[in-house]
Structures are given as C-alpha cells and as structure tokens.
C-alpha cells in the first residue's frame, strides 16, 4: 500500500489490475497493456474481489473502471487457441480455487460504477462495461459485441441489459451482427453517455465521480441503484410498490434533513448514513 500525492494505491493485493482511491473515488485499472488488457479468468476474479472491496468500504463513494495503455479491454485472451471457449465455467473455477473472498459484479456494488472506456472494448471488454452504471467512451475507440463472430454468444447479462439501454432493434443489430462500431456511434446509440477524445475520458469520469462522491447521499444512491437494476426485469408497477416503503423510510432519516438543510445553507452536505450498514430491509424478496 502506498500514498502518493493523496492517492492511496494498493500495489500488493493484485497482479492483473491496479487499485487506487482518491477523494472517495476508487479507480480500478485493467492492467495487461501488453495484451490490450485482454480478459483472463484470473483478471476477472481480481476484478470481482475489487468490486466487493469497494462495496464494503464506506470511504469509497464511486468506482471507475478503466484500462491501462491504449485499450480498455480487447476481449478474451485467445492465447489458448481453439480451446479458448471450450470450458468457460471450468476456467472461472480454476482461476480462484476454493476462494472464500466475496465477489461481486459492477451492478451489484452499492455505489455507482463508471466505465471510462479509454480505448477498444470488444466482446467481454464491452459486456463488462455494460454491467457498469454508465459509460464514457473515447470517440476513436472500436467497440463490438463480437461473440457471434467467434462462434459463441453474448454473456454477462448483455442480452437483457443492452435492449433496456438502447432498445430492442438497436440491441439486435449489435448483438446479432457482432459488428464493430466507433465511440461516436456508441454515444449516438445510447451505449455510452458521452464520446470524448481518449485523453479526456478518464478526467471526465473523475469529474462526474467526485461530484457524486460529495453531493449524493450514499444510502440514497445505494437504494436508487438497486431499484434501477432490479427495474431491468420488472414492470413500473412492481418498482413503484418497492419505492413507496423505501421513500417513507428514507424520508425520516437524517440525510433527508441534511440534504435540504445543506441546499438552503449553500454548503456541501455532511451525510450520516452508510451504504454498507444502514440500509433498510428490502421490500419483497430480500435478495441481492
């Protein structure tokens, strides 16, 4: 662990990613630049453990996922040749044998997760980004849900997530063709919220993250995010049935008073509730 220029960087826990925290924002960097950050199961296991760490640490308010070098993630590492996709589940288990550490996907983290897509994002590189809450992409980046062009299928929930993000017809175009498209088209389609020059992607993600880290109540964000993701497979009526008791609960909490008070007093808010320990019982099924 080292502290350089106010950045808390963990150099000892991970082999395939970098992990650093500054001003309430954790930055996870896929760190195989010599392979364009191509995905391996050990990298995936480290990423999931890092997400769990972010979820549990109340000092972390927002998470950014990005890539080292010129690529975000160029897809699966196909160094195994024809056997690359022959035993996906076996590969996942072998990458983390007997591990007891908690592991999460981006959408399960109780903080916003921003994909700063600084370069090419292909296959699993793009579906990992789709599990994040929003995406900022380099204009010149090449993106593709290339699975059908490798003889496999899209994964990581992309068959459900992408249609909700961009609409059925656009999702069908991207998933069923596996075609390559650029960052500018990604923003036009709604796959990303913004397309910027590559050098501006991470700074813009940090700008958004720092704003949320200071001005958004952690417990409120955690509840809103869970409702957002559960809404992917629910009707509006089902979501509204959950919103009512949650709004009644949070409206009585100190952060609701602080949110109004800090606005009227024109000062930064001082939030009290923790996203990891202070959330209410979940209406209906209590599953995450």
Image (cartoon, rainbow, N blue to C red):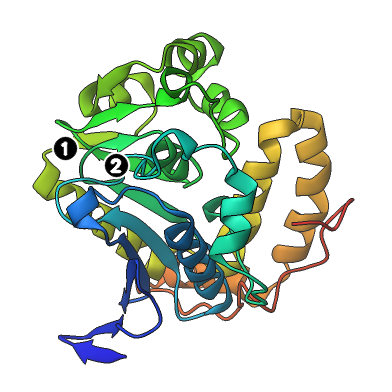
* Placement of 159 over or under 18, stated as above or below: above
Residue 41 located left or right of residue 219: left
Residue 14 versus residue 40: which sits nearer the camera? 40
Q: Position of residue 278 (x, y in %)?
A: 70, 76
Image coordinates for residue 24, horizontal then vertical, percent: 37, 75
Disc 2: which residue: 136
Total marks shown come to 2
Residue 281's x, y, as percent? Answer: 83, 65
Determine the residue positioned at 58% across, 67% down. 96
- Residue farthest to the right, as pictured: 284
Between 126 and 275, the one nearer to me in the picture:
126
Q: Quadrant of residue 3?
A: bottom left
Find numbered disc 2 in the image and state the secondary structure of the residue it sits on. Answer: strand
- Residue 141 appears in the figure: yes
Q: Is residue 110 visible?
A: no
240 above or below 5? above
**Residue identified by numbered label 1:** 196
Residue 220 in percent (x, y) is at 60, 61
Left or right, 176 with respect to 90, comes to left
Q: Is residue 127 above or below residue 262?
A: above
Q: Residues within 10 Å of mark 1 (few under 14, many from 20)?
A: many
Residue placed farthest to the bottom in the image? 2
Quarter holding the C terminus is bottom right
- Residue positioned 47% across, 47% down in the render: 132
């Amino acid at each position: 662990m080292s502290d350089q220029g106010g950045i808390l960087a963990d150099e000892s826990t991970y082999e395939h990613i970098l992990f650093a925290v500054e001003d309430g924002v954790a930055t996870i960097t896929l760190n195989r630049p010599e392979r364009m950050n191509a995905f391996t199961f050990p990298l995936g296991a480290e990423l999931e453990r890092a997400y769990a760490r972010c979820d549990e640490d109340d000092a972390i308010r927002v998470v950014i996922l990005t890539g080292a070098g010129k690529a975000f993630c160029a897809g699966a590492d196909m160094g195994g040749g024809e056997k690359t996709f022959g035993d996906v589940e076996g590969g996942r288990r072998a990458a983390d044998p007997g591990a007891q550490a908690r592991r999460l996907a981006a959408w399960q983290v109780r903080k916003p997760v921003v994909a700063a897509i600084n370069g090419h994002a292909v296959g699993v590189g793009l579906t990992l980004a789709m599990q994040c809450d929003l995406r900022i992409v380099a204009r010149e980046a090449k993106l593709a849900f290339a699975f059908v062009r490798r003889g496999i299928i899209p994964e990581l929930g992309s068959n459900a997530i992408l249609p909700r993000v961009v609409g059925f017809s656009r999702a069908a175009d991207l998933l069923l063709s596996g075609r390559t498209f650029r960052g500018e088209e990604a923003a036009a389609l709604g796959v990303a919220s913004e397309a910027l020059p590559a050098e501006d992607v991470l700074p813009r993600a940090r700008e958004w993250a720092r704003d949320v880290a200071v001005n958004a109540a952690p417990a409120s964000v955690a509840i809103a995010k869970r409702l957002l993701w559960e809404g992917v497979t629910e009707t509006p009526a089902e979501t509204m049935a959950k919103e009512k008791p949650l709004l009644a609960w949070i409206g009585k909490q100190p952060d609701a008073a602080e949110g109004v008070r800090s606005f009227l007093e024109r000062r930064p808010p001082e939030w009290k509730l923790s996203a990891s320990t202070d959330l209410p019982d979940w209406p209906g099924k209590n599953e995450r």
